Amino acid sequence: MPNHYRSNSHISAQVRSACAKLTNQDLAQTMLTILTEQRFIGRLPHFTVQHLCHKFDLTARELSIALLPIAAAYSLAPISHFYVGAVAIGSSGNFYFGANMEFIDTSMQQTVHAEQSAIAHAWMQGETALEEISVNYAPCGHCRQFMNELNTAEGLIINLPQRQNQRLSEYLPNSFGPKDLNINELLLTPRHHGFSLLNTEDLLIDTALEGINISHAPYSGAYAGVALETEDNFYFIGSYAENAAFNPSLPALQVAINHLILSGFELQNIKRAVLIEKKAEISQKVMAKQLLATLCKLPLQYLSID
């Protein structure tokens, strides 16, 4: 079976290529040094953002726009070959990269859009609010609806290279969202649902429990969390992100995969995966098993909670 997905070395090559195409080559070289030193983790802490803004006389918004080609270098697009990058700016001042992700031999619904990727990345890194999202192409309707679930949706700013400082409400007028369903639980708001399992003594299961406990499923109650373990014993968490319009919801496995890739790791390095769900009228079990099998031919460990 051909390898359609990028390894860490491929990501580093794509990042180098993206840097070479930046207009500001001093910024490109600085970014390449930073990303190489942090093993191509697609995140910039607030102090690094401040340093870059000061050094190159840029606002945070201008910097995020300038870095979009680098964010797009993390894209997995073996079907469309269309690479989208996004940068989410947290209230902390941190930058979180995101990129579109497509998967061979499974349904189109498994796809992750770049804006979803950046938001999920920020969420799994502990960010509790986003102020702006910059993206190199106009958000599709799917992504506009997904962003409308955020706890900062009313004031969220969307930036494009050619059109900056526009509120999400301008892209999504007369929107339908959580308020229409009398839901006060919003995406990225810190929470802990209190789920537990007896006698686990397994770090991977404990990590998946963290995922389910912060997951966002106020419409179905189908809370879910995923944990991935790599061959070199790194752990990556994923939480289900549900949406008022249902279809833009992002499954927990995709969130964990996104977390892994944007942390500079490769899919082929996954050695274990576990999904924990609360019993409900919907389940991610079948789709998660299918996607995991297409990515790395691993079985999915599955646990349910009453």
Image (cartoon, grey):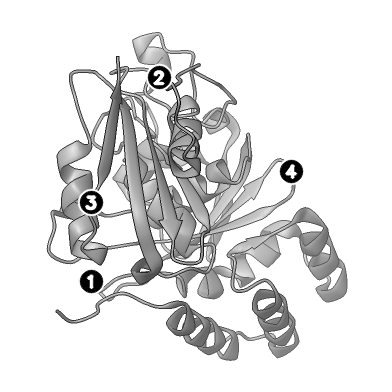
What residue lies at 79% left-to-right and 63% top-to-bottom?
48
Q: How many marks?
A: 4
Tell me the element at label 3: helix
Q: Nearer the viewer, residue 297 or 70?
A: 297
Tag 3: amino acid? Gln
Specify few, some or many for label 4: CA neighbours under 10 Å numbering under 14, 14-19, or 20 or more. Answer: few
Q: Which mark is residue 178?
A: 2
* 220 over 51 or under it: above or below: above
User: Where is residue 11 drawn, in percent x and y?
Assistant: 47, 79
Tag 1: amino acid? Ser
For disc 1, the marked residue is: 80
For disc 3, the marked residue is: 110
User: Where is residue 43 drawn, in percent x and y?
Assistant: 63, 60
Q: Nearer the viewer, residue 306 or 39?
A: 306
For disc 4, the marked residue is: 92
Specify few, some or many for label 1: CA neighbours under 10 Å numbering under 14, 14-19, or 20 or more. Answer: few
Q: Is residue 80 visible?
A: yes
Q: Nearer the viewer, mark 4 or mark 3?
A: 3
Quadrant of the image occupied by residue 305: top left
Tell me the element at label 2: helix
User: Which badge, 2 or 3, comes first in the chain's sequence?
Assistant: 3
Q: CA distance from mark 1 to mark 2?
A: 32 Å
What residue lies at 57% left-to-right and 47% top-to-bottom?
122
Judge left or right: residue 148 versus residue 111: right
